[in-house]
Image (cartoon, grey):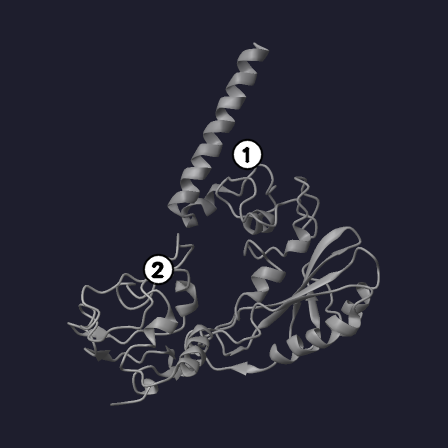
Amino acid sequence: MTSCNGCHVLNASQGFFGGAGLSTFDAESQIFKVPHLRNLYQKVGMFGLAEPPDIDNPIVGSGTPFDGPYTHTGDQIRGFGYTHDGSVDTLFRFVSAAVFTINNNQQSNLEAFLIAFDSDLAPIVGQQVTLTSSNSDVAGPRIDLMIVRAQTNFPSKVLVDLNGGPVNECELIAKLVDAGAPTGYLYDGANFLPDDGGLAISDTALRNKAATLGQEITYTCVPPGSGHRMALDRDEDTLLDGVETGTGFFVSASDTGTRADRADTDGDGFGDSVEVAAGTNPNDPLDFPDAALVPVLSLWGLLALAGAMTAGGLRAGRRKRIGG
C-alpha cells in the first residue's frame, strides 16, 4: 500500500503534475501509465453511472465497485468522465472506490483538491481587473498583487520567457483606449512598455490614465511567454501593434497602415516587417521587395506571391484591352 503521492507526483521543475513516468496495474486488467492530474477539471460534465450487472460484485475491469446511486441524470453537458475509458462520471464517485479508505467529507475535500491540481500555471494566471476613475480602492490592491506575482520566480521545466530563460508566475499586460486609440502595455519588472515602441511609463503614470472617462484600463496576468504577443505584437511580425495603424496607407515605419492581426497584410507572401525594411508598401500586393528575396520565402509565400503577380498581370491586361 502506498500514498497517492507515491504515484502521483507534483514537481513543476521536473514537469510532473500528478505523474512521474510510472506505470501500474492497480485495479485494472492491464498495465497503464499513471495519469497526470492537471486537466481533471476539463472532464467535468458527465453525471450518472449505469448500475453494475451484479451490485455485490466489482464493476468489470475496475477491481472494485463504486458507490451509488446508479441513476440517469439527464443529458450531459461537457465532460467525458474519469479513468482511462471515461466510465466513471465524477471524481466524487471515483474516490469512493474501496482503495480509498476515506469518509464522505474527505471524499469532498479530495475531489476539490483534484479539481484545483496544479497545471504548470500559477494561480494568478488569468486573473483580470479593470481600473476605472472610481474604483481604485477595489482594483488597486489587485493590481498591486499582479505586479508582485509578475516579479516572482516560477519553477517550470517547460515554460520559458521570450528569450528562452526562466519565467515568473505571470506576465502582466494592460489594455486601454488612449486618446481614441487602442493601446497595450507590458510590464517589464519595473515599468510598462507601450505598444508603439515609445518610452516606458511608471505604474503610477499608467494608473493615472484611468482617471479620464473612457480610458479604463484592464490588467491581465497572462501565461509566461505570452505577454509580448498579447500586449505589444499581436501577429508576431516584429512590427509593434501601435505602429500598425490599420488605415491601409503606408506613411512611415511608425505609421505603417497595416493590420496588427495579420503578419502579411496585403497577402503577397512578404511579411509586413520585411516590406517596411525593404521600403515597399506592405498594403499593396503589387508592390513587393526585390526578387532576390524570393528564395527565402516558404512554399506558401511563393504560391501567394505567384498568385499576386498573376492577379496583377490579369488586371493590367484588362486595363490594356479596355483602353484599346
Q: Position of residue 52 (x, y in %)?
A: 22, 65
> Which element carries disc 2, helix, strand or loop?
loop
Q: In the image, 45: left or right of 316?
A: left
Q: Nearer the viewer, residue 76 or 209?
A: 76
Q: Quadrant of the N terminus?
A: bottom left
Residue in view at x 58 percent, y 64 percent: 228
Give whichever of 49, 182 is nearer the camera: 49
Q: Splitting the image into 4 quarters, where does residue 4 fall?
A: bottom left
Circle 1 is placed at which residue position? 286
Q: Residue furthest top?
A: 324
Q: Is residue 161 above or below residue 256?
A: below
Left or right position of 287 against 157: right
Image side of residue 146 versus residue 158, left or right = right
**Residue lying farthest to the left in this orientation:** 29
Residue 100 seen from this side: yes
Q: Residue at x 60, y 49 (%)?
A: 276
Residue on which disc 2 sits: 80
Among the 4 quarters of the image, the one containing residue 299: top left
Residue at 52% in and 68% down: 225
At 49% from the left and 25% from the top, the residue drawn is: 313
Q: Nearer the viewer, mark 1 or mark 2?
A: 2
Q: Which mark is residue 307?
A: none
- In the rendered image, residue 48, in percent from the top left (x then y), is placed at 35, 61
Q: Nearer the viewer, residue 271 or 32?
A: 32
Label 1 – label 2 distance at C-alpha: 51 Å
Q: What's the residue type where badge 1 is placed? A: Leu
118, 81: nearer the viewer? 81
> Left or right: 143 with respect to 305?
right
Where residue 302 appears, x then y in whole percent?
A: 41, 41
Which percent across, then down, holds residue 170? 57, 73
Q: Earlier in the sequence, mark 1 or mark 2?
A: 2
